[in-house]
Amino acid sequence: MTHRLLIANRGEVAARIQRACRKLAIPHVQACSEADLPARYVQEADAAICLGPARARDSYLDIAALVYAARATGATMVHPGYGFLSENAAFAAAVEAEGLIFVGPPATAIEAMGNKIRAREVMIAAGVPCIPGSPGPLPQDAEAVRGIAREIGYPVIVKAAGGGGGRGMRVVRTEAELTEAVALTREEARAAFGNPELYMERFLTAPRHVEIQILCDGHGNGIHLGGRDCSMQRRHQKVIEEAPPPGVAPALIERVAARCLAACRTMGYRGAGTFEFLYEGGELFFIEMNTRLQVEHPVTEMITGIDIVEAQLRIAMGEPLGFTQADMRFEGHAVECRINAEGPETMLPSPGEVSLWQPPEGEGVRVDTHIHAAYVVPPHYDSLIAKFIAHGPDRAAAIARMEKALAGARIEGISTNIPLHRDLMRDAAFRAGGTGIDYLEGRMAR
């Protein structure tokens, strides 16, 4: 069967998916908003279709418009990228209902992992280690909630079952704070996610953020592609990622990954997915599964040689993986810096025209981007404009190559966070490895 792909996303990830399509000779259609219509990556696509006005809810978040775009352009597959509708079970179901292929897992798996309580239950059943927490949704009765918190032990964190992106959660350090915190979080969850269900976990005080990347086909085969460290974060948004995670025993990754794959088999999972963990005291504790491509996937590609987007497309077309866990080789170390159009100190967005774009070059350096000189960064969307990835034979070499890459890059006309990345590459704690998820916030506060 001849396939045609609708790319239901924008910017850097859209350009990345286009690259994989050209590699596999898959004709593609780029969906876009009116704001993105003039962009070079849109104009250079095999075909393009405008979804509607600039606002995301009128374009990239409009399920009906995207399904119509796929049908109108003769697409047989839809790739959601990341962000927007990439983890929306209703979107996946709507695509499937049209007889099209959703490049990702079945809607049932997205729905199961989108509810944090259900996801936790699936992981516990598969033997994936989880943080001690409530056995299910928190009850309405305040005294019962206090009893659960006492059993878990303070501090605890109250989370929205349907939450994500750092929203819908509160840390509670004493029993006196608990009732109000639960009420506020429940109302926030209702307003933000349409689901007031909450659950509770023990709050780890100094964890790292470690991930495990998996790939599963539709033929019962599944492998893991090792771990990543994404602990350098600000406001729950990742800034720097690397692979493999420094100081985390490969045997631990192997052991936990095997249980993650067991959970995938239970769900009938298909495609790429990422299991996210908090790492503390030499142990991994499951927090959520991302049922999509991750922004940080290039660091895994650099150490494995596996093109994850190509693998997604091949799996969607019904092909088996073509390689096994025994075939996997992890070579060297990779670091990724997310380049955002924002002030390096204020972190406020900096939309506008790029007057000069000089991407970095050098051995082991890769740049994923959609921008160019004269590109206008729109004010309507996420500020990510590029990713710099550096690979070396070891971590020190990868960091040294990233330092050179950041020094050689020039972007003018807008502000970017490149100065922050330059500082972090020289930061003694980062260079030593093992900084926790609160390190960057504390550093910037100081």
Image (cartoon, rainbow, N blue to C red):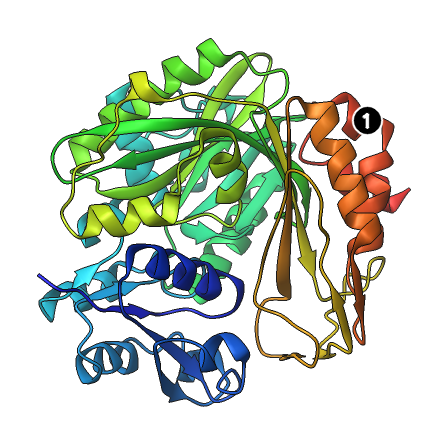
Residue at x 47% of width, y 65% of height: 15
**Which image quadrant is residue 325 in?**
top left
Q: For the C terminus, give its image quadrant.
A: top right
Establish if 303 lies above or below 416.
Answer: above
Residue at x 49% of width, y 20% of height: 284
Label 1: which residue? 429
Find residue 58 and report its horizontal and vertical position in percent: 41, 84
Establish if 337 lies above or below 346.
Answer: above
Residue at x 52% of width, y 36% of height: 302
Residue at x 86% of width, y 45% of height: 445
**Seen in the image, is 78 located left or right of residue 318?**
right
| Callout 1 secondary element | helix
Find residue 309 and report its horizontal and vertical position in percent: 37, 49
**Mark 1, residues whose alpha carbon is within 10 Å: few (<14), some, or many (≥20)?**
few
Residue in front for this viewpoint, 248 or 412 = 412
> Which residue is farthest right?
446
Observer able to see residue 137: no
Q: Give the residue type at disc 1.
A: Ala
**Seen in the image, is 419 located left or right of residue 19?**
right
**Seen in the image, is 148 located left or right of residue 110?**
right
Find residue 125 and report its horizontal and vertical position in percent: 24, 23
Observer able to see residue 49: yes
> What count of labels does the image hold?
1
Residue in front for this viewpoint, 361 or 230 = 361
**Which image quadrant is residue 210 in?**
top right
